Image: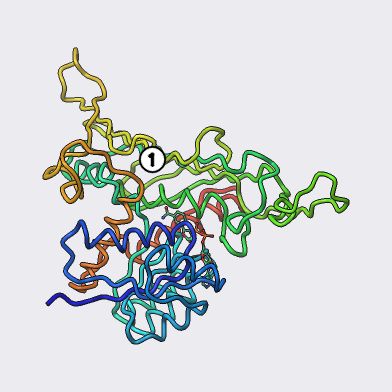
Amino acid sequence: MAKTLRVGMIGYGFMGKAHSNAWRQAPYFFPLRAKVELHTICGRNSAGVQAARAQMGWQFATTHWQEVIESPLIEIVDIVTPNDSHAEIAVAAARAGKHVLCEKPLALNVKQAESMLAAVQKAKVMHMVCHNYRRVPAIAQARKMIAEGALGQIHHFHARYAQDWLVDPEAPLRWKVQKEIAGSGTLGDIAVHVIDLGRYLVGEFKEVCGLMETFVKERPTPQEVTSGNPSAKTPAKRVKVNVDDAALMFGRFENGALVNIEATRYAAGRRNQMSFEINGSKGSLCFDLEDMNRLKFYETANLPDRQGFRDILVLQPGLHPYVGQWWRPGHALGYEHTFVHTIADFVNACVDRKPVQPTFEDGVKNQRVLQAVEESVKTGRWQKVS
Ligand SMILES: NC(=O)c1ccc[n+]([C@@H]2O[C@H](COP(=O)([O-])OP(=O)(O)OC[C@H]3O[C@@H](n4cnc5c(N)ncnc54)[C@H](O)[C@@H]3O)[C@@H](O)[C@H]2O)c1
């Protein structure tokens, strides 16, 4: 009889929905070595969390995350709250002996992230940070090809994460635009995903040089916008924006490859585009999340008269990572599948008690790159990643 792992999830917003779906789908599509029970969902608003419980299919709801931690029935804690609460919840969960899955960025800063890593290591529980893009089949396939030497020696990792939800200067302030809650702006929110992919695909960062910009210095608070009545007498309250709207960095990996990364919320027309190109001595690979089931591959070994990028449709069961658990050849996968893959691997790791990437150690290393970029921006100098 398979073991049952009961899950408590803290938060029920955007990621709460993505994770709830994944907890439900993973056992349906993947051969998990435990049954999964969606036990308790937690949020701050009683009516909101009850509605989420009913819609997302959880058995119980609470407005106090400590109840999830204290429950002897729950073995996995899934943290999908804003960044400022990750550390406190994860450390408490680890101390209570729970396995911890935590959304990215792992924490607000390196110190917090290190305390989280120390807590999970001390408690000997499984830990994973949710960099779900590692489990896009095309990206997992890129990793496999690079490991097999298809690109030879890597010279360049060039990546971009571009969104456009702040182009409008009247777009209201949200927690992602508040340093106290988010830690940073584009840097910790979206650049961190491609930094993580750089580490996954190419190697560890050695040194960086950064540039960050805040284009719109003040924004209206959400209340003023929602109650916004053109004839209202009181002017909308505007609050100073204290995070980066765009972050650029270039640098070096330990293995000598060069990196340049751009992250922005001001790329009009780019709702959520994440792309990269990797160039090596034997060829190149390109990926674009807007066409996420394809990889573009160029090989220098091809005859000169037929050289060019070719498309690999990464949807072949039996050949491409994760794809075999889904549909027949060529049937497209999407964003939500990346979370199912992440959670399926995490559940099996909890059963086997074997580390599963990306661990909190990866979270700490990513956080060190973020810190080095911020330090470089502050000093105007190159910064070692330590
Ligand atoms: N992996 C990804 O691609 C991805 C995408 C978006 C967001 N994220 C990350 O996921 C996390 C959540 O982001 P989101 O977009 O879902 O946010 P959100 O604002 O949509 O949802 C946050 C949820 O947390 C709850 N919450 C906040 N503080 C709480 C507390 N103290 N106790 C209990 N519940 C609390 C809120 O009620 C809400 O349900 C962030 O760390 C973010 O960086 C990751």
Q: Amino acid at mark 1?
A: Leu
Query: Would residue 80 be found to the left or right of residue 347 on screen?
Result: right
Query: Would residue 63 be found to the left or right of residue 57 on screen?
Result: right
> Which of the 4 image quadrants contains residue 303?
top left
Q: Position of residue 167 (x, y in %)?
A: 62, 39
Q: Position of residue 225 (x, y in %)?
A: 72, 50
Helix, strand or loop at mark 1: strand
Query: Would residue 209 be found to the left or right of residue 318 on screen?
Result: right
> Which of the 4 image quadrants contains residue 268?
top right
Asked whether residue 386 is in view, the answer is no
Q: Is residue 32 above or below residue 236?
A: below
Say few, some or many: other residues with alpha carbon within 10 Å of mark 1 (under 14 / 14 to 19 / 20 or more).
many
What colour scheme was applied to this rendering of the protein? rainbow
Reading the image, the residue beneath label 1 is 258
Q: Residue at x 34, y 41 (%)?
A: 257
Quadrant showing the C terminus: bottom left
Task: Pick the residue in front: 266 or 67.
Answer: 67
